[in-house]
Image: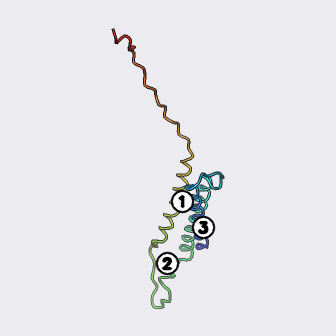
Amino acid sequence: MVILFLLVAMGFALVSLSFCIYNARKVPYQSIKGHKGIYLWSCIAAIFGALALLCFLAAMRHHRLTERVANFQENLFVLVVLEDRLGWSFWLGVGSVATHVAVCGVVAMSRIKLPKPEIKKPEEPAVPSLDLLY
């Protein structure tokens, strides 16, 4: 299940990447290929990545995988695991989900319309130029 969720998340991340490249090359004219499309595919990839990480953590805790691996084919004594350590690949998955969430945030913030600053015209001098001649 974890591998399936990771593969689905990678698939949606690749779809999001392809639409990002397409939007960089051409003007988006459909919502599925524009900002909404990138937002949609990145959110779906983040959700499936988070589901994969949660399934991995649940399986590790529920089935006590660390103890089972530590005591695999051990007959003389039993190793007691005091704490679980998550490896580099788990934190890479967390970084991937965080990156997808950041992309969703950037795309959402790019749609906010900020007020344009008003450019003031330079004021005319208080003394007319004809008065300066006399």
Residue located farthest toward the front when viewing the structure as drawn:
133
Q: Which residue is mark 2?
A: 66
Foreground tag (3 vs 1): 3
Q: Earlier in the sequence, mark 3 or mark 2?
A: 3
Amino acid at the residue labelled 1 = His
Q: Nearer the viewer, mark 2 or mark 1?
A: 1
Question: Residue 122 or 17: which is nearer the viewer?
Answer: 122
Whether residue 35 is visible here, answered yes or no, is no
Q: Which residue is mark 3?
A: 11
How crowded is the residue under tag 3: few (<14 C-alpha within 10 Å), some, or many (20+)? some
In-front residue for pair 80/134: 134
Q: Earlier in the sequence, mark 3 or mark 1?
A: 3
Q: Which mark is residue 80?
A: none
State the residue position of label 1: 100
Quadrant housing the N terminus:
bottom right
Q: Nearer the viewer, residue 83 or 17?
A: 17
